[in-house]
Image (tube, helix red, strand yellow):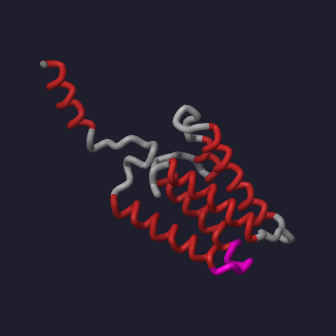
């Protein structure tokens, strides 16, 4: 019984210092901000215009980067923050989705002739959504 009491006291001591993965350190206001922004992104896709598809992908990428910063992942660039996520915390498909979605955004930025089609934008947005859910912020 003494060990259990000591363990509970220890948990109370570390409670103010949240962990840096799975979104456990986001407060309700931060989660609501992310959910609100995500609703806007999904609304852009529903509009069905190519310019909105592009904007939705850009905004989803920015939202993921914002979430990574809030979760405490470090790095000077989004790529650095993505690389700092521990491979043991998530399945391989999480990393595949995250990198594929981010690469589409990069292709849109660096290739002026790149046109994102509706089916591709929807696929990429679903990847961002899955990643944000896995991180525990959606």
Between 91 and 6, the one nearer to me in the picture: 91
Q: Which residues are magenta?
A: 47-54
Residue 50 vertical position relative to residue 100 in the rendered view, above or below: below
Between 76 and 109, the one nearer to me in the picture: 109
* Picture quarter with the N terminus: top left
- Which residue is at a point 57% across and 51% down the rendered structure image? 131
The total of numbered circles placed on residues is: 0
Residue 6 vertical position relative to residue 72 in the rendered view, above or below: above
Between 42 and 103, the one nearer to me in the picture: 42
Residue 5: where, in percent of width, then height?
14, 25
Residue 40: where, in percent of width, then height?
53, 74
Q: Is residue 110 left or right of residue 48?
A: right
Q: Quadrant of residue 104?
A: bottom right
Dominant secondary-structure state across the stretch colored magenta: helix
Residue 50 covered by magenta stretch:
yes
Residue 107: where, in percent of width, then height?
78, 61
Residue 121 vertical position relative to residue 11 in the rendered view, above or below: below
Q: Is residue 115 left or right of residue 23?
A: right
Residue 99 vertical position relative to residue 90 in the rendered view, above or below: below
């Amino acid at each position: 019984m003494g060990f259990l009491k000591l363990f509970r006291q220890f948990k109370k001591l570390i409670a103010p210092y949240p962990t840096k993965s799975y979104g456990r350190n986001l407060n309700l206001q931060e989660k609501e901000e992310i959910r609100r922004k995500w609703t806007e992104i999904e609304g852009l896709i529903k509009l069905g215009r190519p310019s909105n598809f592009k904007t939705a992908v850009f905004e989803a990428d920015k939202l993921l980067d914002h979430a990574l910063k809030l979760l405490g992942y470090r790095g000077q660039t989004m790529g650095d923050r993505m690389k700092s996520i521990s491979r043991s915390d998530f399945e391989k498909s999480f990393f595949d989705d995250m990198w594929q979605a981010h690469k589409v955004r990069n292709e849109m930025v660096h290739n002026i002739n790149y046109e994102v089609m509706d089916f591709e934008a929807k696929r990429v947005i679903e990847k961002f959504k899955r990643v944000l859910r896995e991180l525990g912020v959606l």
